Amino acid sequence: MLRYLTSGESHGRELTAILEGMPAGLDIDAQAVNRDLARRQGGYGRGGRMKIETDRVEITSGVRWGKTTGAPIALVIRNKDWENWLEAMAVTIPDVLEDARMVTRPRPGHADLPGGMKYGHRDLRNILERSSARETAARVAVGAFAKRLLDAFGIRVFSWVTEIGGVRWSMKGKADAGAFFEAAEDSPVRCPDAGTSKKMTARIDKAKAAGDSLGGVFEVVITGVPPGLGSHVQWDRKLDARFALAMMSIQAIKGVEVGVGFRAGSLPGSKVHDEIFYGKTAAHGALWWPQSPAFYRKTNNAGGIEGGMSNGEPLVIRAVMKPIPTLYKPLRSVDIGSKEPFRASVERSDVCAVPAAAVVAEAVAAYETAAAFLDKFAGDSMKEISRNYRGYLEQVSAY
Ligand code: EPS
C-alpha cells in the first residue's frame, strides 16, 4: 500500500513529506525531483515569493546509494523565506517579538474564516500558514517519486493549460500528448499553442493592472496505462473516484472532469461511448500493448476509464482552478476582533497560478496512478513487481 503525509507551514522552517510503500530497488534521481520543483515555481503571473525561493529536495531517509530500500522515504524542502519569519513563526515564545504578524482579517475565498472558527484561533495566521498552496511543493516532490516508478513501466504523465480567465485554447486535430507537453514546457503559461499563450499572458497583465486574480483549466494525460487499474467492485476502488479526490485536494480546485466530462450532459449516448473493435491495429505506442490482433478504440471520450477501471487508452483528466483569493483589489470582509467591516488589501500574491497547479496535478495524478499500479502488481521489490506485471500482460495478450 502506497501512502504519504505532508507537513509544514508556508513561512515555517520547511515542508516535509513521508512516502511509504515504494518498492526497493528503484533508481532515484534527486535532480529529476528538483526539476519538477522548479517547474512548479514557474509560470507567468506568479508573485514575489517565487523570487525568494529556489525549491530543492533533501532526501533524508529511504534511499541508499541511489536506490530505494523499501523503507519510508522522508523528503524535506526548506523555506528560504523562513529567515524573515523567525519570531513570528517560532516554535517557542520568542524573547523579543517586534511583530507577531497577526492576521484578524479573513480573505473571502480562503480557509481563513472557517478555519479560525473551527480551530478557535483568534490569529488567522494559524490557519493560512498551513492552507497556503506552498504545501504543494511537498506533493510535487512525492509525485516525482511516483513518476519515477511509473516511468520504469513505460507510463508517462503530461499536463498543459487549456484556459486562463476566459481565454480558451480550442485543441484542433488529434491529441498528441508528447508534442503538446513539449510545447507547453516552452510556454510561459503551459499552453501548447503559442498564439493562445500570448493572449493568456495579456489577460494576466490586464488582471494584474486591475488588482485582480485569475483561474483557469488544465488537463493531465497519462499514457501507457494498462487496462485493469482500479476496480468496479467497491466505491473507493474506482480509479476515476480516486483521481477526483486527488484533484479536488489541490488548493483552489473547484471541479474535475474525466474524458468528455461535463459535455456528456449535452451529447447523446451514440456520440459519447467509444466503440470497441477487434483486429490488427497500428502500433499503440504503449509498452504494455499486446501483439496484434487486439481490442482497440478509435475514440477516447471515456478518458481511459470505464466502470472505475483503466481500459488501456490514455487517462484524460481536467480540472478547474478558481482565481486565487489573495488579491490586491479590495474585497469586503469583517475583522474577527472588532467585527468592523473592512476592505482587504494585500502586500504580495500571485495573479495566476494555473500553470503551477497543472504541475501539481501531474504530481497527484502520478501518485494515484502509482498507488493503483502497486495495488494491482504489489511487491516489495522492483523485481517482484516486474514479474507480477509481466504475468498479467500475458493474461491480457491472450484475452
Ligand atoms: C506559494 C507560496 C505563497 C503564495 C501562494 C503559493 O507565498 P507567500 O504567501 O509567502 O507569498 O505565493 O499561496 C497563495 C497565494 C495562497 O493563497 O495560499 C507557493 O509556494 O506556491
Image: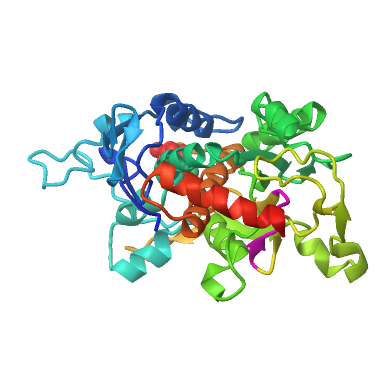
Query: In terms of image quadrants, where is residue 126?
Result: bottom left
Residue at image point 79% right, 33% down = 196
Query: In terms of image quadrants, where is residue 303?
Result: bottom right
Q: Give the range drawn in magenta.
A: 308-314
In front of the other: 17 or 12: 17
- Is 321 contained in the magenta span? no
Relative side of 126 to 174, left or right: left
In front of the other: 179 or 331: 179
- Is 310 contained in the magenta span? yes
Residue at image point 28% right, 40% down = 62
For the N terminus, the quadrant is bottom left
The percent coordinates of residue 371 (x first, y second) are 48, 54
In front of the other: 151 or 194: 151
Relative side of 61 to 319, left or right: left
Query: In terms of image quadrants, where is residue 43?
Result: top right
Can residue 318 be seen here? The reply is yes
Residue at image point 7% right, 40% down = 95
The percent coordinates of residue 171 (x first, y second) are 83, 41
Residue at image point 87% right, 67% down = 266
Q: Quadrant of ligand 1?
A: top left
Relative side of 83 to 363, left or right: left
For the C terminus, the quadrant is bottom right
Count how many numbered circles sit on residues in the image.
0
- The relative height of residue 273 versus residue 94 in the rendered view (above or below) is below
The percent coordinates of residue 4 (x first, y second) are 37, 53
Relative side of 349 to 119, left or right: right
